Image: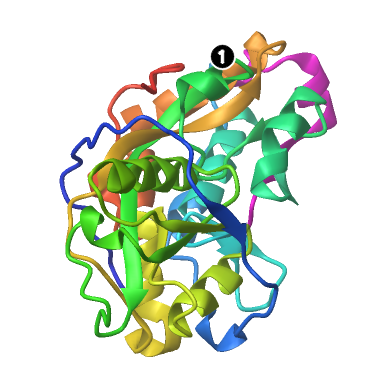
Amino acid sequence: MKSRLSLLALSLVGIAALSACTSTLPTDTDESSAPTADDQPAAAIISGVAEDSEIAALLPAQYSDAGVLQVGSNLQFPPANFYAADGTTPIGYEVDLATAMAKRLGVDVTYNDSAFENLITSLQSQRVDFTMAGMNDRPDRQEMVDFIDYFKTGIGILVAKGNPDGIVEPADLCGHGVTAGVGSSQEAWALALSEKCVADGAEAIDVVTVNNDQQRLNSVKTGRVTAELNDLANLVYIAQTANSGEDFEVVDLPPLEGALYGIGVNKETPELRAALAASLQSLIDDGTYGEILAAWGLQAGAIETVEINAGQ
């Protein structure tokens, strides 16, 4: 990917998740909107990551003996994790971070593509060892799994090119349709905003949920909904790359409801959590983490210290 993205300073918009009208998007899609990438900008950085024997010793034997960690993800979330143009190779800054963490631990990683709403269940049933899927570290999720926080993020609003409905602030979405992932923080935020719309005397938001990003994009492009809500970095990437930047634009706002992305780990595997956290911290300390994010143009989302379950 040749373009370089930038994140605005994170700001918090605190709205509690409430209830509102939710519908489901039909399943037709327009593949012409799909952003793809052939190159991997951090490849040279990843190739230079070496095993650290002291950190590798923290990894429980069942994983080191297997020689591979199973990663659960939802591979349709550029630039975090998605498929290259060949349709089979996982790429993205999260893929690079997971690969670098595994190399520091002396093992490989295998990506397991899954629907976003199934990721926590996959962790709890130990079908995967950890998840890395642009998942916000939230208190309700902390009750089910632990999170190793690794990236600062926030919600953005994607609209069709030219912004035909004139969306300039969140309140402008009242009375319109928006689309977001099933069970996502963006869905919760939209439902809460819809409740506020009604309380203020405006029309509710029609919150359309679906976990296929191409369907969400197509619904915006065709005018079925006014906007897609998603991670700001993801939406900036789409706006810049889909149809050479001719289909979409991102509303010029700071990230909404700033949050932390977390690596999900089963609560019954604290030793694995400790090994992953130590590996990530070592990559931060030696500069590799920052170099990977910079290669994707996402250095503004970097953290300095690894924390566990720090999401609010």
Q: Nearer the viewer, residue 263 or 163?
A: 163
Q: Residue at x 28, y 67 (%)?
A: 4
- On screen, residue 221 versus residue 53, left or right, reads left
Considering every residue shown, the one lying at the far front of the view is 201
Q: What is the x, y in percent for residue 239?
A: 35, 75
- On screen, residue 24 versus residue 80, left or right, reads right
Would you identify the image quadrant in which residue 289 lies?
top left
Q: Which residue is drawn at 68% across and 31% down?
A: 120
Q: Which amino acid does label 1 sit on?
A: Ala
Q: What stretch is highlighted in magenta?
A: 55-75
Local SS, label 1: helix
Q: Nearer the viewer, residue 223 or 137?
A: 223
- Say if residue 2 shows up in the picture: no
- Say if residue 157 shows up in the picture: yes
Q: What is the x, y in percent for residue 243?
A: 43, 88
In the figure, 112 relative to 176: above or below?
above
- On screen, residue 154 versus residue 112, left or right, reads left
Instruction: Check if residue 102 falls in the magenta segment.
Output: no
Q: What is the x, y in percent for residue 88?
A: 72, 68
Q: Which residue is disc 1 drawn over? A: 274
Q: Nearer the viewer, residue 267 or 16?
A: 16
Please say which color scheme the image uses. rainbow
In the figure, 81 relative to 267: above or below?
below
Image quadrant for the C terminus? top left
In the figure, 233 relative to 189: above or below?
below
Q: Which residue is drawn at 49% across and 66% down?
A: 40
Instruction: Check if residue 68 falls in the magenta segment.
Output: yes
Q: What is the x, y in percent for residue 69?
A: 73, 35
- Density class for disc 1 (Cα within 10 Å; few <14, some 14-19, many ≥20) is some
